[in-house]
């Protein structure tokens, strides 16, 4: 069974299903999960061909009306053939009725393939944008702690906290969440969270705080520009995510595909009845279920921010930043210690006097800043 969603994420979802289908967590079906060794082993297993638990009902929760309608048409066709045709009513279940479906099936296939491919391109672009956010945030924190003055400790800490906050603010913005997630409670102060929740555009508000904090750093102009460029890159990703969220695949194309598919399956029982008789409603329901499933996949991943594991992405970014902050002092000490002490291979290449001079030269270099001026 799939795990249920956290309460914070449930608030963001707006699905109009029957209550009985909502109990099955149908919205979880299209949510992407982060894979590990166990998940990949299961993904490649032969068990992937068979549904688990109520997964068929979960899928059906998204498009049960068309399937039910086709079953209803199949029953009507059966009743017509059984009771009205013997009384002289026109024959509507001949074998040659399959020809229109043969002629139009290729067009339906092209529509479905284009629909799903276009949706996948949108999903992949969104996934790539969130992958870049990991690089942007890590570079921002790394440069801040590497270049900032030692006296800027509190400001560096504030930049690290708000770097985490901009990612969660983006998640809130894309999922239209009104409340900050619990993961921010140990990152921002209570009044900072309250201020962030009141903002109309939370990612922009968070980056404004971050920009002002970067301005307060005691770094060179070049270094400040380099740090600020990562904030600019975040805004580029933000704009790309907003474009995907606000502009779907052309609605006319989506509607025409859906109407084509509904018309095609609605007349399917007329072509199948001569061969399957009273099994026609069930055969038509299976075909409708499979075809609408392909179309439904395209619809679900068209808006990728509801299916991508954004909470996991945010948690991963938060963990990486906190780890970088925690190990910065030790990493700096290790780097300076390594530069002041020659390695055994360096000592072996020089005589005792040369090795002593090498140590003195390394110590002199560590006393200079990157521009060659004394610290």
Image (tube, helix red, strand yellow):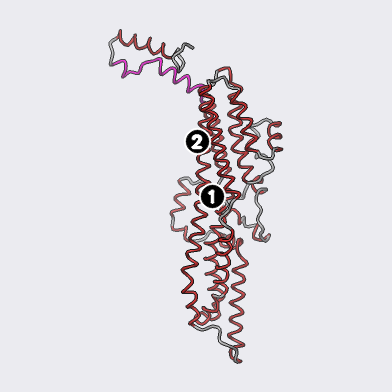
Q: Which residue is located at x 40 percent, y 17 percent?
A: 339
* Quadrant hosting residue 361: top left
Per the image, the residue denoted by label 1 is 32
Q: Position of residue 197 (x, y in %)?
A: 69, 38
Q: Residues within 10 Å of mark 2 (few under 14, many from 20)?
A: few
Look at the image and tell me in which quarter the N terminus lies: bottom right
Q: Which residues are magenta?
A: 327-348
Q: Which mark is residue 135?
A: 2
Q: Which residue is located at x 28 percent, y 10 percent?
A: 351
Tell me which label, 1 or 2, sits earlier in the chain: 1
Magenta residue check for 51: no
* Quadrant hosting residue 352: top left
Q: Position of residue 34 (x, y in %)?
A: 51, 46
Q: Which residue is located at x 71 percent, y 38 percent?
A: 198
> Which mark's residue is nearer the viewer, 1 or 2?
2
The answer for how far apart the CA atoms under marks 1 and 2 are is: 21 Å
Residues at circles 1 and 2 in contact by the CB criterion of under 8 Å: no
Q: Residues within 10 Å of mark 1 (few under 14, many from 20)?
A: some
Q: Secondary structure at mark 2?
A: helix
Q: Secondary structure at mark 1?
A: loop
Q: Is residue 244 above or below residue 88?
A: above
Magenta residue check for 328: yes
Closest to the observer, 345 or 302 = 302
Q: Is residue 310 left or right of residue 201?
A: left
Q: Is residue 352 left or right of residue 168?
A: left
Q: Is residue 303 above or below residue 255?
A: above
Q: Position of residue 289 (x, y in %)?
A: 55, 66
What is the chief secondary structure element of the magenta stretch?
helix
Q: Is residue 55 above or below residue 165?
A: below
Q: Position of residue 21 (x, y in %)?
A: 64, 60
Q: Is residue 255 above or below residue 161?
A: below
């Amino acid at each position: 069974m799939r795990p249920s969603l956290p309460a914070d994420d449930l608030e963001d979802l707006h699905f109009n299903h029957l209550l009985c289908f909502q109990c099955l967590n149908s919205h979880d079906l299209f949510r992407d999960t982060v894979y590990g060794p166990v998940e990949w082993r299961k993904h490649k297993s032969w068990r992937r061909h068979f549904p688990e638990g109520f997964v068929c009902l979960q899928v059906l929760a998204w498009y049960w009306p068309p399937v039910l309608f086709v079953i209803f048409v199949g029953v009507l066709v059966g009743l017509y053939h059984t009771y009205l045709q013997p009384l002289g009513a026109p024959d509507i279940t001949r074998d040659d009725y399959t020809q229109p479906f043969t002629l139009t099936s290729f067009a339906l296939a092209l529509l479905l393939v284009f629909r799903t491919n276009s949706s996948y391109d949108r999903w992949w672009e969104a996934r790539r944008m969130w992958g870049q956010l990991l690089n942007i945030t890590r570079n921002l924190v790394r440069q801040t702690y590497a270049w900032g003055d030692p006296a800027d400790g509190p400001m560096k800490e504030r930049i690290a906290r708000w770097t985490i906050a901009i990612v969660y603010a983006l998640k809130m913005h894309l999922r239209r969440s009104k409340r900050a997630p619990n993961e921010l409670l140990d990152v921002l102060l209570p009044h900072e969270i309250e201020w962030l929740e009141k903002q109309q555009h939370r990612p922009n508000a968070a980056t404004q705080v971050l920009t002002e904090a970067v301005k307060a750093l005691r770094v060179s102009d070049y270094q400040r520009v380099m740090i600020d460029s990562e904030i600019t890159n975040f805004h580029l990703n933000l704009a790309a995510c907003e474009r995907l969220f606000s502009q779907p695949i052309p609605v006319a194309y989506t509607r025409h595909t859906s109407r084509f598919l509904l018309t095609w399956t609605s007349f399917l029982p007329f072509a199948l009845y001569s061969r399957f008789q009273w099994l026609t409603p069930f055969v038509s329901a299976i075909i409708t279920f499979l075809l609408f499933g392909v179309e439904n996949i395209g619809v679900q991943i068209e808006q990728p921010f509801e299916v991508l594991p954004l909470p996991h992405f945010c948690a991963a970014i938060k963990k990486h930043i906190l780890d970088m902050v925690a190990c910065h002092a030790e990493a700096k000490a290790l780097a300076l210690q390594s530069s002041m002490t020659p390695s055994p291979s360096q000592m072996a290449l020089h005589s005792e006097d040369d090795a002593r001079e090498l140590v003195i030269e390394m110590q002199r270099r560590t006393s200079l800043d990157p521009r060659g001026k004394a610290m």
